[in-house]
Structure formats: structure tokens, C-alpha cells
Amino acid sequence: MDTSALDAKPQTSAEWQEFYQRLEGKSTAALWEVLAEIVPREPRPACLPAIWRYNEVRPLLMEAGRRITAKEAERRVLILENPGTRGMSRITQTVYAGLQLVLPGETAPTHRHVASALRFVIESEGGYTAVDGERTTMRPGDFILTPSWTYHDHGNPGETPVIWLDGLDIPIVNFFETSFAEHHPEETQPVTRSEGDSLVRFGAGLQPLEYQSPRMSSPLFTYPYSRSRETLDRLYRNGPVHECHGVKVQFTNPATGGYPLPTIGAFLQLFPPGFRGAPYRSTDATVYCVVEGTGRSHVGKETFAWREHDVFVVPSWYPVSHEAEGESVLFSFSDRPAQKALGLWREQVPAGGA
Ligand code: 1HN
């Protein structure tokens, strides 16, 4: 490519400055001054590599639990804010993440919004989330969906705190300026379908006869960890183990084979004991949550040592390589389906790599 325009030098003389002032006065601007910035040769993310250690954030979340009820807060959540974009309520430029707490006896009221959500359960003994009239008991490691514009509420009839990681496409929805939201007339929505209904209908390689999906996201609302963990275990035994990813799977919409949400993809991967992964990069900035084990991930020039429930983020196009001590499991999510739908997604595996 001819590089001259991409590398144009700013014009600084008084005469040019006077011209630029006249441009400014008419709400115009010189492309050649900003071209290299708005069309970089490769991604230059504002998003930075970062880690949130569970043993540091959990006490703050519990303190929030003493200061405000789930009902008062509507959702009692600590947003995990990327240090490169503080104040913007996001963990990457396109994805929001937070840690949510529901204390014993609490409920979080029913509402719906255009933004799609996922939950990845960290602590729960009997907490539930209800989506579209169906309650799902939350267990650690479960991956649960709240598709766009579905009514949802949460509750904790158990005796211990319930904590999960939320992932939402709020920055995408707000970028398009397409956000709507409303409350349900009832604080706790009526239960209209039995527990496990979506799992029975869609979670066994079967679906209702000639099923036509009413929405763009998965009709399966819950992906229990017991099932996905067993899949990883058996895949590991069957091999192969990818040199970058270990044993990695993606959550699917069983009605289409595609991603569970139109904007967010989610993944689960297992590293064998002593795994030393090769570097990999892709354009979808990715949020990781450690499910099991301990290890280290090299993200660009940073190294994050991680343990259970830690959350870390790998920005777009930063090389990442993972190392595990014992057998380890990572959950992750990103805007990959949105990038793919727009023809934007790229990845790079090591030269000669698998
Ligand atoms: C939301 O509805 C939930 O339902 C969690 O648990 C986090 C962040 C922004 C907007 C809506 C929930 C949210 C949210």
C-alpha cells in the first residue's frame, strides 16, 4: 500500500493554522491530520491488559452488600472497568463486565432491555435467575444467557452469598444508540415453565419439530458446568491438544450451531498440567474468568499469574500465551460474533502452528 497519506505530517505554519481555524468554524476538519490515527496499520486498542484478583474484589463486593440492598441498587454490581477506558463502564471497547452479588433472602427486580447478557456463575448454593418465565438454579461454572428483550430477575433463597460474572453488549448497543429498557409490572416475574424446560427442549441434540427461532440468540438458556466440564475431560482424553488453546470449545446456539448471542461468543478451555501454550492473537478483545487451577498468561509485555475466579482481559491483537500449573479451566467471552458478522475478525496462530 502507498504509505504517504497514512504517514502525512501535521501542518503547523501560521498560515495553515489560520486555515484550520476556518475549517473548525464550519464544523469541518482535515483528514490528512488524523488519517494515521483513524486508520492505523494494525489495531491500537485503548483497552489495556488487566487482571481483577478475586481475593481483592470480593471483599469490596461484600462491602457493597452491607451498604446497599439488591433491590435498592436494582442490580448490585461492581463494574470491572478497563484501566485504559475508566469511567466508560466497560471492560473492553465493546463489552461490559461486572461482578454481581445477591445475598441470602434477596431478589433483584424483573426488567428487560435491548442489551444481551451472559452470566458465568462463581459462587452459588441455590441462587436462581429467571429468564422468560423459566427459573434456572445457578451452580458454579454454569453459563447462563439472558437474550435481548427477555424479562429477567434473580433471587437467592439459599444461605450463602451468590456471586456471578455478568457480560453484556452494552457498549455495542449504546454505540448504535439503540437502548431501550423497562420494568416488569411484577417485581418477581411469574414462573410459566418448569425448571430445566429449555434444557429438555434444546439441550439433548433434539429440538421441537420444525422449530423456528423467534429470536437471534440461543433458545437454550443454561449450559450446566457438569456437562461442559465432562465434555472437556473427554475431549482431553481423546485429543488433540491445541498448541495455543489447549482443549478449547465454544458454546453454541443448538438451533443454528452459531454463537449463543448475536454479539457475544463464549468459550471454555482446559489446559493439561504443565501446559505451556504458544502465542496467539485475534482481533476480538477477550475477557477470561478462571474456573479451576492456577497458571500464568502472558499478554503483550505483561504477565498475569492467576487463580480461581480471577478475571483478566486480553485486548485486540495483543499476543497471549497461557501456562498452567495443575489441570486448569478458563471461561472466556468476546464480541467475536459481531466482528464476524461485519467481516472484521482476524486471528494469527504461530507460523507453522496447528
Ligand atoms: C443487568 O440487567 C444485569 O440483569 C446485570 O443482572 C448487569 C448492567 C447494565 C445494565 C443491565 C442483570 C447489568 C444489567
Image (cartoon, helix red, strand yellow):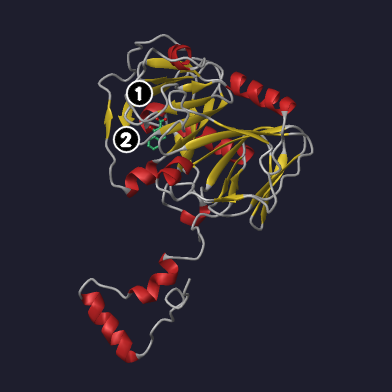
**Percent of width and height locating residue 46:** 48, 58
Q: Is 289 situated left or right of 202 in this image?
A: right
**Which of the four quarters of the rendered structure image does ligand 1 lie in?**
top left
Look at the image and tell me whether residue 107 can be seen.
no
Question: What amino acid is found at the position of numbered circle 1 in the picture?
Answer: Ser
Q: Is 83 situated left or right of 74 in this image?
A: right
Q: Which residue position is annotated with label 1? A: 213
- Whether disc 2's CB lies below 8 Å from ligand 1 is answered no
Task: Check whether the beta carbons of the residues at disc 2 and disc 1 lie within 8 A of each other.
Answer: no
Task: Choose mark 2 or mark 1, whichever is in front.
Answer: 1
Q: Residue at x 39, y 72 (%)?
A: 34
Look at the image and tell me whether residue 322 can be seen.
yes
Q: Is residue 192 above or below residue 226?
A: above
Q: Using the image as rendered, state which of residue 131 and residue 103 is in the foreground.
A: 131
Q: Using the image as rendered, state which of residue 37 and residue 88 is in the foreground.
A: 37
How crowded is the residue under tag 1: few (<14 C-alpha within 10 Å), some, or many (20+)?
few
Question: What amino acid is found at the position of numbered circle 2 in the picture?
Answer: Val
Q: Which residue position is annotated with label 2? A: 114
